[in-house]
Structures are given as C-alpha cells and as structure tokens.
Image (cartoon, rainbow, N blue to C red):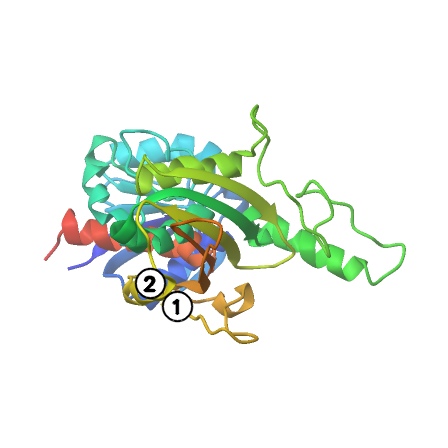
Amino acid sequence: MGYRIVVAGATGNVGREMLNILDERQFPVDEIAALASRRSLGTEVSFGNRTLKTQDLDTFDFTGWDIALFAIGSEATKTYAPRAAAAGCVVIDNSSLYRYDPDIPLVVPEVNADAVLGYGKKNIIANPNCSTAQLVVALKPLHDRARIKRVVVSTYQSVSGAGKDGMDELWDQTKGKYVPGQEVAPKTFQRQIAFNVIPQIDVFMEDGQTKEEWKMMVETKKILDPAIKVTATCVRVPVFVGHSEAVNVEFEDFLDEDEARDILREAPGVLVIDKREPGGYVTPIECVGDYATFVSRIRQDQTLDNGLNFWVVSDNLRKGAALNAVQIAEVLGQKALKKG
C-alpha cells in the first residue's frame, strides 16, 4: 500500500527533481498531484513514464493526502503549508521559513533521521539549506569519532541555487560576452556572474556575515550539535549545478587522515574519491545527477594539533534539496506513517 503524494512547485527546478527522484527511488506512490501557481496552471511535468498536468495550488484540497513536498519559496509556503498541515497532510518544506522553529524538525536523514518523529507538533518537517545538507553529511561520521570543536567552511555555490533566473542569467551573460556591445547587465545577482565570483549570497546582516553564512552556522548546530562552532564564507561561482565546499575542521581528539578517509568511505550518503594525483578528486560537473555527497582532498591541517582539511561536492538540486526531501519522506514512512 502506497501514499498519496503532493509536489507543490512542480514546474520549478527543485519540484521537477522531486518528481524525478520519487520515480527513480521507486517511492511507494498510489496517487500523485503536481501543483503550481496559476500562471503555470496546466503546464505538463513528467513523473516516470507519466505526464502530469499541474493543478492550482491556491484551490487544492489537501484533505486525504499523506505527504506534500513543498518547493515554492518562503512567502507562498507561509500561506499554503499551514493549510496542508491542518488538513492532515505532512509538509516537507524546502524553503527557509520553518528551519529555525524549535517545534519543527530540521532533518538530514543520514545525520538525524529520528528527528522526523517530532513532526507531529505542527505537521511540518523542514529541509535544510543546500550547503548545510552536504556539509553535515560529511561531518557526522567524523564528529561521532573525534568530536568536532570548530568548522571553517568556504563555499563555491552554483547559480542553480538561485533558481531558473540564476541559471538563465549565467547563460545569457556568457553568450553576451562573446558579442561585443551586447553584454547582459546583472539582475538576479549583485554583480556579473559570468567569468566572475561573487562573495555574497543572500542579504548582509549587522555583524557583516550574509544570511547564507548565518544559515549554515545555525542549521549545522540544530542538525548536528549545538556545541560546534561554525564560521562560513559563501561565494557564488559561474557553475550551473553543483555546490563545492572547502572545509577545515578542528576536533577534540586527534583523527588521522587515513582513518578519516576510511570512516567516510563507510558513511551513508558519502562517496570518497581521493587520489593524490592530477584529477584525483571530484568537481561539480561530475556530481550532477548523482545522489552522493563526494569527499576529496582529505589531509591533516599542519597548523592544528587535531585538524583536517577536505573538499565536499554535491548536486545542490538533489542532495541539497529534492533528494533530501524525498529521503525525509522515506524515513517518515518507515518510522511514522507506516502503511500496509
């Protein structure tokens, strides 16, 4: 016996990936509804071999539906998630709206799967920020072994993290740079993104960090351990899909790089590709379409007694968003909404 599943925001990048991953992982679906705003009403989306016509999110009745995967942004989620939750449908939300609510679990299944059991307070579960998701997947097994004191992370985030508009802007600017006099001015990003990097993602806060950097700190503490100190610098780079992170970790206990490599090889959701030769690591272009969080360049930090450096890459539309949401739904089905 399967579930009645809703995908809200089905025409967007993440919504389409949610539909793809539900099919790829053979999630037990009895019935599925693809929802979109009225401007996208009737747009067709694929679910395996089936073609679905989108229905109107504004008038949809969530009564009798089991799980709703939301990929519609914070403003719309503020309206429709409580409506779905009140109708008895468990919402798994990809926006930032509920991540910091103490009554709503923030879940990465490889890290804190049991947290889904707290969904009943509001009938909502939050999906973390894309950069946080891949980071904590790599940190968790190392933290279990040697206890992490501090994390310093620099991110190299693809334009798909800003949605279709971000991808279009990179494409248009890249083409435009080869046509003199037809350069495309930035709209989605603060500066030109083609052939450039931008050290700002989201808005600046009073202390000088951006909100994206703040999210990584707060979410890592909530998901993994509130005692861990985290500092981040988040940078947008001219890559279409795939987020990368350079990570420096200080542990309470010494952890040898070889043992760390072995631990990560056995860790759920992690794939280690780490050869000390040219090209013996993973870059964003190789991770696109993959489920794994890839870890490379594992090495001791010679400036610390108990430090490691490593490189983390993942498909941000998958593990950073759609895949993590579907994995939450799988855990929810196993632990709470058992059928059959």
Disc 1 to disc 2, C-alpha distance: 7 Å
The residue depicted at 50 percent of the width and 70 percent of the height is 281
Identify the amino acid type marked 2.
Answer: Leu
Q: Can you tell which mark lies on residue 264?
A: 2
Residue 279's place in the image compared with 114, above or below, is below
Mark 2 and mark 1 in contact (Cβ < 8 Å)? yes
Q: Can you tell which mark lies on residue 272?
A: 1
Taking the image as drawn, is residue 61 in sight? no
Query: Does 246 sit left or right of 165 as displayed?
Result: left
The residue depicted at 46 percent of the width and 66 percent of the height is 289
Percent x, y of residue 206: 57, 23
Identify the amino acid type marked 1.
Answer: Val
* Mark closest to the chain's N terminus, 1 or 2: 2
Percent x, y of residue 34: 39, 52
Percent x, y of residue 164: 58, 52
Residue 286's place in the image compared with 77, above or below, is below
Query: Does 176 sit left or right of 146 as displayed?
Result: right
Query: Does 41 sit left or right of 224 as displayed?
Result: right
